[in-house]
Amino acid sequence: MRMGIALVLALLVIAPTLSISGAQEGTEAPLGCQLSFDGNLANESVGFQTSLGPRIPGSAASSELRESIKSNLTGWHITESTHHVNGMVLTNLYATWNKGAGSTVMFAAHYDSRSAGDKDWNESRHDEPIDGANDGASGVAVLIELARHIPSMNLSHEVTLFFTDGEDQGDYNSQAGWILGAKAWGENLTQEEADSIESFILVDMIGDSDLTIGKTYPGNSSLWDRTEEKILFLDEVCELGPSNYFDFERTDGIYDDHVPAHELGIPAIDIIDTRYGENASYLGGHWHTHNDTADKVSAESLGKIGFILESGLLTGSWSNVRVIDDGEIEEIDFEPELVEENEELEESQDDSEMVIGILLVVCILLVWGNLVWLIFADNRGEG
């Protein structure tokens, strides 16, 4: 009888350890880690876009791509704007979710491909248009795949996807011929409309199989701080791969579609790999050559950027980037600091688990000690 009681006590002590272990295994991932972005689907989009041929402004391939984008954005509020610039007909495409909710977060990518491969080693091909798999298709692919998941996020603010035209048609002698679609957008934006945009995040040339990105300027420092925090969060908390593709020390200057937004006072950054290909130099490698093909783009790289944008939406990283006080716009620090908070939470959990473990060991030793004593007492006829 005594032995039966002791065994029951032992089981009562051991059972909680089993249930605690099971609860830990079934713990849900932290907010911002349960991500759905599919890099493989984004990579398929790159292949589709390049199969259309060069997406030069005003071309049939350009029009076909726009129609395809719109067909993938069911339920979104879609508008277009047409602009005549430098003898070209440019068409910007806008898709908004939660139209009218305000506090717009804007993601942008250019969908045109360059009409000349004038950086190619083969000078006889300098006048031929390039595929633009990375420089053009990669950013569009990320936005299209991100759009699949935004409707299920229950966001309380607007999200606008901005597909710009005429970004990549300039020459190297001046800035005048570049970012034409983004310039036209900025020129037709009222200050009130500009003030309603919380953040402008451009993604360009982010599919490189050898992804190496860093900060760029001009750019909003608070947005870059949040982006860096998000990259570390995805690595250290979500365990979704190492963050070594991001150079936290390097900053490159770049004239890209985010500049008109920046000049209007909109917090803006450009997430871009300015070194296309292994060991490539700044704006070198496969950039503006006929090597900018779909085989140089990887689902893994597209997925890394997609996770940054998706997790940022889920955790509010792209919202409340600025506060308006007496007509002045000032940058504010990102709160909460997700990486630090999660590290503190993990440390607290580790301490609690250690205390519980010690108590359990003490209880088990007492119970088994009592069991041994009872067995010994029974053998002697005592107790």
Image (tube, rainbow, N blue to C red):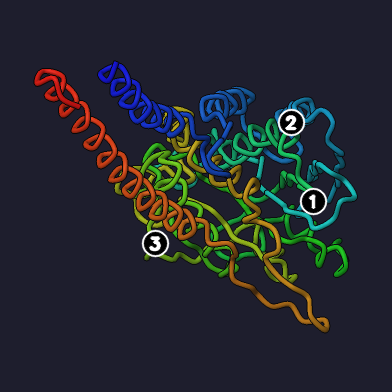
Of residues 324 and 45, the one drawn nearer to the viewer in this rendering: 324
Q: Are marks 1 and 2 in contact (CB under 8 Å)?
A: no
Of residues 337 and 323, the one drawn nearer to the viewer in this rendering: 337
**Callout in the foreground (3, 2):** 3
**How many other residues sit within 10 Å of disc 2, few (<14), some (14-19) or many (≥20)?**
some
* Labels in figure, total: 3
Q: Give x and y (percent) for residue 43.
A: 53, 28
Quadrant assignment, res 174: bottom right
Instruction: Report the Cα–Cα distance between label 1 and label 2.
Output: 22 Å
Instruction: Report the Cα–Cα distance between label 3 and label 2.
Output: 34 Å
Relative to residue 184, is residue 136 depicted above or below?
A: above
Sequence-first tag of 3 and 2: 2
Q: Give x and y (percent) for residue 184.
A: 79, 58
* Residue at mark 2: 69
Label 2: which secondary element: helix
Q: Amino acid at mark 2?
A: Ile
The quarter of the picture where the C terminus appears is top left
Which mark identifies residue 248? 3
Q: Give x and y (percent) for residue 356.
A: 35, 45
Sequence-first tag of 1 and 2: 2
* Residue at mark 1: 157
User: At 51% across and 53% down in the image, what residue appears?
Assistant: 230
Which mark identifies residue 5? none
Q: Are marks 1 and 3 in contact (CB under 8 Å)?
A: no
Q: Is residue 54 left or right of residue 61?
A: left
Relative to residue 261, is residue 6 depicted above or below?
A: above
Q: Are marks 3 and 2 in contact (CB under 8 Å)?
A: no
Of residues 342 and 352, the one drawn nearer to the viewer in this rendering: 352
